[in-house]
Amino acid sequence: MPLKVVEEATAGVPTHCPYCALQCAMTLRPRPGGGADVEPRDFPVNGGGLCRKGWTAAELLSSPDRLTTPLMRRTRTAPLEPVSWDAALDRIAAELRRIQDAHGRDAVAVFGGGGLTNEKAYLLGKFARVALGTANIDYNGRFCMSSAAAAANAAFGVDRGLPFPVTDIASAGAVLLVGANVAETMPPFVRHLPGAGDDRGLIVVDPRRSQTARDADLHLQVTPGTDLALANGLLHIAIAEGLIDTDYIAARTTGFDEVRRNVSAYWPERVERITGVPVSEQRAAVRMLAAGRANGGAMVLTARGAEQHSKGVDTVRAFINLALALGLPGRPGSGFGSITGQGNGQGGREHGQKADQLPGYRRIDDPDARAHVAGVWGVDPDVLPGPGRSAQELIESLGTPDGPKAMFVAGSNIAVSAPQAGLAERRLAALDFLAVSDLVLSETAKLADVVLPAAQWAEEEGTMTNLEGRVLRRRRAVAPPPGVRTDLEILAALAARLGRPDGFEADPAAVFAELRRASAGGPADYSGITTDALDSGAAVYWPHPGEHGTPRLFADRFPTADGRARFAAVRHRPPAESIDADFPLQLITGRVLAQYQSGSQTRRIHALREAEPGAFVELHPQLAERLGFADGQEIRVVSRRGTARAVVRLSDEIRLDTVFMPFHWPGDQRVNLVTNPALDPVSRMPEFKVCAVRLEPPLAVADRLHPSAA
Ligand code: SF4
C-alpha cells in the first residue's frame, strides 16, 4: 500500500516508536515513492538506540493487511463485508442503543488498550461514562500494570512506574531487577544498567537464565511464584546484618515494626527451601545492594515476572518493603520502580479508561473527583456511573444473564491476550453485538459484527506517557490510507449518533486541552503541560500543575496523608494452581525480542515474522529427554483450561521443573489457552505468569499411542 506523505513531513518527523513503554525516539522519513525510513534519534531513554521492532516499525504503515474500509456482517453467522462509514456507524449506534433500552445502560461495555494515546484513552473513558452512561469500561492495562500500580498507590500514595528519570539508573551502584528480561523486551534500556567491567552490580531474579540474567553479576534462579518469599528473605538478611537504614525508616515511613516481626519468619534456609535460591546467593544479593547504596545508590525494579500473579500486589509490596528498609526511595541514584510494558501503559492508566478511575488518576468513588470531572464534562456528578467490573471479570461476564450484551473494543486483542483465551473467545461470541476498532483484522476483530478501520501511530497526532512518567508528543508523519479514520473521529461520530453532538472533539489538540483541565489537581496533573513544551523536547514529567513538572518524586515527602511511605506485612503463599501428578510442570510466560504483545502488529512485519514465526516452548534438555521430545518437534502444552501447540526449543538455561512459552501467536498457538485467570484480590490482575501443565505429543501421535487419551 503506497503511503500518502504529509506535505511538511518529507524532511522527516521526530516521533517515538509505536510499541513498548520505553518510547524510543526516532525520526520517520516517508519516501515519496512509498514506504518510510526509520532513523533512531538521540533521546535520554534510548541514547540513539532502537531494537529490531523499532527499526522495522515503518513497515506496518504500508502493510497489505491494513483495513481500509469498515466491515459488517448482517447476522452473527454471516461473513464480514465492506460497507460505508455511515452504515457501520449507524449500525453500531443503533445496536448499542437498542441493547441499552432493553437491558439497561450497563448492558454495553467498552474495552480499551494500553497502546492508545492519552487523548484516545481520555475520550474513550468519557464516551463510556457520558455518551453511553455505562459503568462497564476497562482495558488491557489491567493485565499489565495493575498490581504494580495498586502496590505503589498503597505504599507511596501515587503510581508512576519509575518515579525518577530512567537515566538515574545509570548512577546506581547496584540494581535488583525482578522478573524483567529487558535485554529482549526493551534492549535500549540495558544501557542504563550496570554492565560488564564497571564497578556496579546487577542482580536479576528470574526462573529462566534469560539474556538479562546471563549479563548479570548475580542471577537468583527463583522457583516460579516465590518472589514474595525471596523479598521477605532478603529483608530478613538486611535486618540481621545491620544493613537497613534506621534513620530513614524512622523519619520517612510507617509500619516497619510489623514488617520486622513478619520477616523474622523468613530465615535464609527456609527461604532457600521455598524459592530454590541458595542462602549464599541471598546474602550476596543483600550485600551487593548495600554496597551499591554506598557507591552512588541502589535500585529495586520489578516487572511482569513478579507482578502477574494472584499475589502480585503483595509481591510488589514486599520488594517496596526491602527498598524502604534500605532507605532508597527519594534518594539520588536510588529508589523503587516498576518497568511499564505497553507503549502508553502509564498514560493509559491515568485518564479514565480503567473501571475505577477518572482522568488525572482520580478515583471514581471519590466525590470531589467526580464533581471536578463532571464539571469539566458539563454533566451532573450523580450521573457518572461506576466503578464497573475489572477487565477479566468483565470478559467472563459477557453475554451472561447479568453481564453486558454488547461491547465496543478499541486497540485491544482480547481473543489472544486474555487468560484462559478459549473462554474469552466464547464469551465474545456470546455477545449480541461486538464492534471493534483496529488497524488490522485482529483475532478479536474477526469475531466482531462491525469492524472499523482505524489510523495508527504515525498517521495521527497525540501524546504518550512513557515508563518514567514523561509526556511525549507523537507526531503525524503520513496521512492514513483513504477510508481510514482516527479513533477520536470514530468516538466523536458515535457520540453524535448517541445524542451527544457536543463535547466529543475529534481534534487531538482540543482533546488534550480538555484532558489537561480534567486532570488539574489530580495525582497525574497534566494541567501545566503545553504543546510548545512537548515540541521543544523539554523533559515534561507529571505532576505538572504549573510551569514546571516533577522529574523526581519523593525527595522530601510521599504524597500520603502523613507524608510517609507505608510498609506492609505480606506473607508468601503458593500460586493459585500447584503442580501435581497430572500437571507436573510449571509454565511461565513472557515476551521475545522480535514480537510484541498479541503480535497483531509485529506478526505482520516480514523480518520479525522470519525471526520468530510461531509459538515455541522452551524446556531443559534433560526434561526433553525424559519425556522423549526433540528440539524442533511440535508438541502440546496442556493445562486444566486448554491446550496450546508449540515447537520444542531446548535450553539448559531454564529450571528442570519449568517450561517457558511466549504469548504472541494466535489460534491454537496461544499460550493463553492454557494460562490461569485466577485474580489478585486487590488489583484483579490474572495469574498469567505461572500455572501447572503437562507436555504431550501432537494429537495424531497421541491418538496412535493412547487412543483413549484424545
Ligand atoms: Fe520500540 Fe521498545 Fe524497541 Fe524502543 S525498546 S525500539 S520503544 S519496542
Image (cartoon, grey):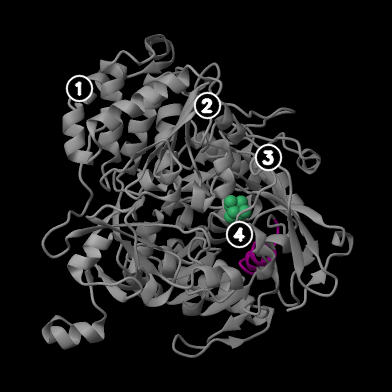
Residue 118 is situated, as x and y percent measured from the top left of the image, at 63, 50
Q: Which residue: 40% across, 76% down?
A: 667
Q: Are marks 2 and 1 in contact (CB under 8 Å)?
A: no
Q: Are marks 3 and 1 in contact (CB under 8 Å)?
A: no
Q: Residue furthest bottom?
A: 78
Question: Is there any visible trace of residue 217 in the rendered image?
Answer: yes
Residue 172's disc is 2
Question: Is there any visible trace of residue 344 in the rendered image?
Answer: no
Q: Which residue is mark 4?
A: 52
Residue at disc 4, secondary structure: helix
Residue at disc 2, secondary structure: loop
Q: Earlier in the sequence, mark 4 or mark 1?
A: 4
Q: Which residues are magenta?
A: 489-502
Q: Which residue is mark 3?
A: 517
The amino acid at mark 2 is Ala
Q: Residues within 10 Å of mark 4 (few under 14, many from 20)?
A: some
How far separated are the C-alphas under marks 4 and 1? 46 Å
The amino acid at mark 1 is Ser
Residue 496 magenta: yes
Residue 536 is situated, as x and y percent measured from the top left of the image, at 81, 40
Q: Earlier in the sequence, mark 2 or mark 4?
A: 4
Q: Earlier in the sequence, mark 4 or mark 3?
A: 4
Residue 406 is situated, as x and y percent measured from the top left of the image, at 45, 70
Q: Which residue is mark 1?
A: 264
Q: Are marks 4 and 3 in contact (CB under 8 Å)?
A: no
Q: Are marks 3 and 2 in contact (CB under 8 Å)?
A: no
How far separated are the C-alphas under marks 4 and 3? 38 Å
Q: Residues within 10 Å of mark 1 (few under 14, many from 20)?
A: some
The amino acid at mark 4 is Arg
